[in-house]
Image: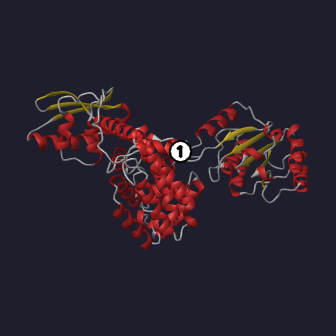
Amino acid sequence: MVGQEHVVRALKHALEAKRLHHAYLFTGTRGVGKTTLARILAKCLNCETGVTAQPCGKCSACVEIDAGRFVDLLEVDAATNTRVDEMRQLLETAQYAPTKGRYKVYVIDEVHQLSGHAFNAMLKTLEEPPEHMKFVLATTDPQKIPVTVLSRCLQFNLKQMPPGAIVTHLEQILREEKIPAEPEALALLARAAAGSMRDALSLLDQAIAHGAGRIAARGVADMLGAIDRTYLLEILSAIANGDAAALLKIADDMQTRSLSFDAALGDLAALLLKLALAQTLPDSLADEPDRTRLGELAAAIDAESIQLCYQIALQGREDLPLAPDEHGGFMMTLLRMLAFRPEGGAQVISAPAGKRPAAKTDAPKAAAGWPELVQQLSLAGAARELARNAELQRREANTFELVVPKAKAYLAERTYTDKLRSALEQHVGGAVTLKVTAGETAGTSAAALEAGEKEARRAAAAQSVQADGFVKDLVNLFDAKVVDSTIKQEGK
């Protein structure tokens, strides 16, 4: 029962205290262990050593339950036994004492598919259950179970397996089986299982057969028809750099390999979610195999663009069937991500002809020329973003103490600070001591100053548009309103 410790602990305490309920309801998505747990509970109740939280597994009751031939364990699939007559016939045997075991255990899977009349028939037995009878109900959709039945059950919700837990369990199995596997391959299987340990084990069997006893990432990706994450990372990198040519090449390569563009947009949205989480909660990338690359992308793409690209990916996936062809629909979705980025794409409106007033800004002065120094350093990616968002607190000779905003604490990771230190050493021509912390900032970083100047230019452009005679005529004629946020300077 991997990942279901909360349920196991509660049942264990109840069994040890002999506080048994007459009806249990296990809820959760497919393949998380509902019916497995029901069989384990049946063993706990009927083990010849007594009611116990640790059945022996060796007595005739335990062995027969494992083999599926214990006479007092009745398993029913409600999906194929939905009618009231079938339920009444099943419950007629409830009045009789167990043939061999201590308790008669009725396991009803997908119980939500029973008809209303069948639920009513079962309700009578739930209201006055015989001492020797236990119900174990399992369902993926508890909302469809009548409240009258729910109120008479002890309910446990089994959780979806997180990918990390699935990978750990698969690694344990493969160690015992002495089968080699690449970590990236197991991560692909865990993602494809979508929280279901049963699906993960089935996929693992397929992967072993597909790889002839060796589980490799490329082989698993081919088996699943999965999108190689490298494509997605390159797409995000091209979006960060505004490189439309690179996007076109990636889309063409994917078409050559006959990869699913629908799946690619879904996986791209999932990756954008990870970037958004990384910007808010840097520790969320701790278990990611590509955490360094994801951290660099989270630093290179602003939060607003990530949110916008996420929405475009979802909408693009919905529009894909309407496109002239999937390749064109996919390409248009990627170009839309470029076009609607705050820093790129078509300009909504150019400022009317005429001399623009000089921009004024109240941005604070930079400390010790750090923003100017940043412009001279040879940096790229996350290391560049670290330098741009950092403020110089103190400098003594070749010792630099920097502070970054708490919201960008992930930039203080050693991978990025080492790159910044190397760039500083190259610039000053000697060894550099660098200390970077996250804390309160004063708005004197290169990024903050650029943002202040940009806002000042936008305000000046807005003022120029508002004062333009032609625009005034349009406003008066159509009772219109100029939306300042849509005004951008030509070439900006």
- Identify the residue at horizontal 70%, vertical 41% (top origin): 49
Q: Is residue 203 visible?
A: yes
* Residue 430 % position (x, y): 8, 39
Crowding at mark 1 (Cα within 10 Å: few <14, some 14-19, many 20+): few
- Identify the residue at horizontal 47%, vertical 58% (top origin): 188
Please say if 122 is above or below 78: above
The front one of 28 and 326 is: 326
Q: Can residue 169 be seen in this view?
A: no
Q: What residue sits right under mark 1 in the picture?
A: 477
* Residue 2 % position (x, y): 56, 46
Q: How many marks?
A: 1
- Identify the residue at horizontal 42%, vertical 55% (top origin): 339
Q: Position of 73 compared to 246: left or right?
A: right
The front one of 383 and 462 is: 462
Q: What residue type is labelled 1?
A: Leu
Report which quarter residue 319 is drawn in: bottom right
The front one of 400 and 128 is: 400
- Identify the residue at horizontal 35%, vertical 35% (top origin): 409
The front one of 471 and 323 is: 471
The residue most toward the left is 429
Q: Element type at marker 1?
A: helix
* Residue 197 % position (x, y): 57, 53
* Residue 451 % position (x, y): 33, 37
Report which quarter residue 10 is drawn in: top right
Question: How is the model colour-coded?
Answer: secondary structure
The residue most toward the bottom is 256
